[in-house]
Image (tube, rainbow, N blue to C red):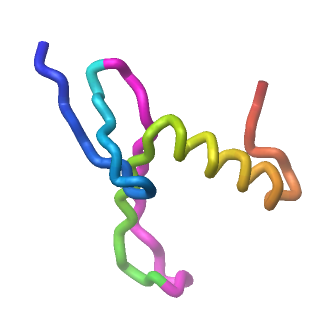
């Protein structure tokens, strides 16, 4: 099986999809957003996902991480 390689949006490093690592999200913003009708395509490596998760835990009133 051939590995798919994508780039992390934060650090630019390679994410090798063969090993089920990394994080991907695709989202189209709605009319009430300042990014009205734009799309978000975000790929993060495991290290950058950990950094983002730590930031979200500190910033959110409700912890987004479920044990």
Q: From where the camera sits, is residue 19 visible?
A: yes
Q: Nearer the viewer, residue 62 or 58?
A: 58
- Which residue in the rendered view is the most extreme toward the left? 2
Q: Nearer the viewer, residue 18 or 29?
A: 18
- Which residue in the rendered view is the most extreme toward the right? 61
Q: Is residue 46 shown above or below 62? A: above
In the rendered image, which quarter is residue 20 located in? top left
- Tell me the residue at 44%/40% (across/down): 45
- Tell me the residue at 67%/46% (across/down): 53
Q: Is residue 37 shown above or below 1? A: below
Is residue 30 within the magenta segment? yes
Q: Residue 23: x percent and y percent?
A: 45, 39
Q: Is residue 21 shown above or below 41? A: above
Q: From where the camera sits, is residue 26 visible?
A: no
- Which residue in the rendered view is the most extreme toward the bottom? 34
In the picture, measured across the screen, residue 34 lies left or right of residue 27, that is right
- Tell me the residue at 27%/20% (across/down): 18
Q: Nearer the viewer, residue 34 or 17?
A: 17
Q: How many marks?
A: 0
Magenta stretch bounds? 19-34
Is residue 42 within the magenta segment? no
């Amino acid at each position: 099986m051939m590995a798919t390689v994508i780039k992390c949006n934060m650090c630019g490093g390679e994410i090798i999809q063969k090993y089920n690592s990394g994080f991907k999200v695709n989202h189209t913003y709605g009319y009430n957003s300042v990014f009205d009708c734009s799309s978000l395509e975000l790929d993060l490596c495991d290290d950058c996902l950990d950094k983002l998760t730590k930031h979200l835990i500190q910033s959110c009133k409700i912890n987004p991480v479920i044990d």
